[in-house]
Amino acid sequence: MTGNRTKAGKARFGADAMAPATDTLPGVFPREMGPNAMAYLQEVIDSGLGSNMIQRFTDYLAEMHGRKYCIGTTGCTQAIFAAMIAMDFEPGDEIIVSPISDYGTIAGILLENYIPVYADAAPGAALIDPDSIEQRITDRTRAIMVVHKLGLCPDMARIMAIARRNDLIVIEDVCQAILAKCNGQIAGTFGDLACFSFDAEKTCGGDVGGAVLTDDPDIFKRLEQRVPGRGAVTEPGFGRVYLNRGFALQIPQCSAAVTLANLEILPPQVKQRQATAAALDRLIDDIPGLSSYNVPDGHTHSYWMYGFIVDPDAFTCTVDQFAQQVEAAGIQAAGLGRYYLLADGVPFLRDQALARQFPYSQPPASYDYYPDSYTGDAVPHARDFLERWVRWFWTEKYDMNHVDLMGRLIRDIAERHRR
């Protein structure tokens, strides 16, 4: 893959990337809305935009996770950007990042001129490998960006131990994994900061929205000053003085109202996702050549996405063809997710590193990042996983009849192409 892209189609994001429902299987949309959504929106309108809805939303989310502080943002990319502008690292400082994720995970890193360094995934998984994290640590490493991909946490006990030994900040990207657990502890409560998404298609959709949680009063003070405050303080007799870089990223009142209402109905929705996904796992594991995605002992998966792994040697068709037939059979948006491989999916970053453009110039960078950091060869476990993994968006609207249908459709495809 190179930085030269020709005849590329327009990328689709958010709700536009979601397939609509069909007569057979429901899609993600239309979403179930919390019963209080209209009442909360009416409060915002009746108050003439003077409501305390943003504070109520952030208080609710913080209490749900047992954390002290919360800032609401306009989306998931913006939540991570907010986390980055609350850090006082230097240009050229490094942040170790999960290799399988979305561009939104690294956008804030790049905008602050920090350098993302991809660790590899654990073998057979979409989650960052703690051993690979240790191998990437240098004297310029300042933080670890841990993505709870698809709805599942990595080994957070080991990751936190590595971070504390090396005096590193841990930032959790929980955008796909709200209410997932690792050894009884909820995602978003391990690190120094945790970033969430409430965009329309996420597990808890609220049109657009995000949030950052922390227990650290100093980090929260910087978040307050640099996000809703845009980096300013008020100087008597003068007015606003901008002491830091900041950006207006605060969640709007109406988005906070909808998200708050949908958070109130989220726990039973996640339980429904888990029950139906576990049932399909059993059906998938009974099909030779296919295997369900492993959920480690002590972990719970909140299933923003569901997927299974294909053994390419078991079938006469390619994995791509298998995925295409799953979608054609009626499972909307089924396919491979190669674009999640950040090392190959963000070629402009590779070009920038190769040309030694700032911050890859030396200084501030301390060594050459190309090709070791910015090709798929640098993260072979992540690349290999994405070559065999077929996935689609999961929804709480699935019931056991839908699960049985999906199981039959997938089995039929497997049997037609069995080697």
Image (spheres, rainbow, N blue to C red):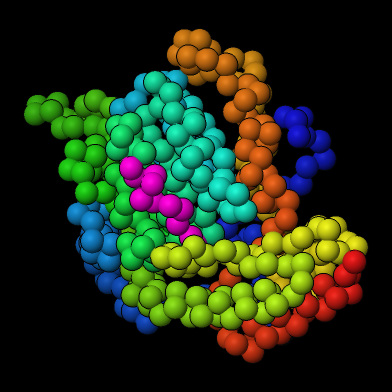
**30 sits to left or right of 59:** right
Instruction: Tell me the residue at 58%/52% (across/down).
Output: 126
Q: Main secondary structure of the magenta part?
A: helix
- The reply, left or right, for residue 144 in relation to residue 408 is left
Task: Pick whichever, 209 or 240, lies toward us.
Answer: 209
Magenta residues, start to end? 151-161
Along the line of sight, the residue nearer the viewer: 182 or 207: 182
In the image, is 209 to the left or to the right of 304? left
In the figure, 349 relative to 323: above or below? above
Q: Quadrant of the N terminus?
A: top right
In the rendering, at what x and y percent does residue 87 appear? 32, 32
* 280 in relation to 389, above or below: below
Q: Position of residue 64 (x, y in %)?
A: 27, 66
Q: Is residue 106 visible?
A: no
Q: Quadrant of residue 14?
A: bottom right
Residue occupying the far bottom of the picture: 401
Query: Percent position (x, y) of residue 23?
Result: 71, 85
Residue 417 seen in render: yes
Q: Nearer the viewer, residue 7 or 301?
A: 301
Residue at horizontal 68%, vertical 67%?
Answer: 291
Total number of numbered discs in the rendering: 0
Up the image or down, 245 lies above or below 75; here it is above
- x 70%, y 77%: residue: 286
Where is residue 121, by image quadrant? top right
Quadrant of residue 66 in the image?
bottom left
Q: State the image coordinates of residue 240 (x, y, percent, origin top left).
A: 21, 30
Specify whether residue 186 is painted magenta: no
Residue 158 colored in magenta in the image: yes
Is residue 26 found left or right of 238 in the rendered image? right
Which quadrant: the C terminus?
A: bottom right
Q: Residue furthest left?
A: 236
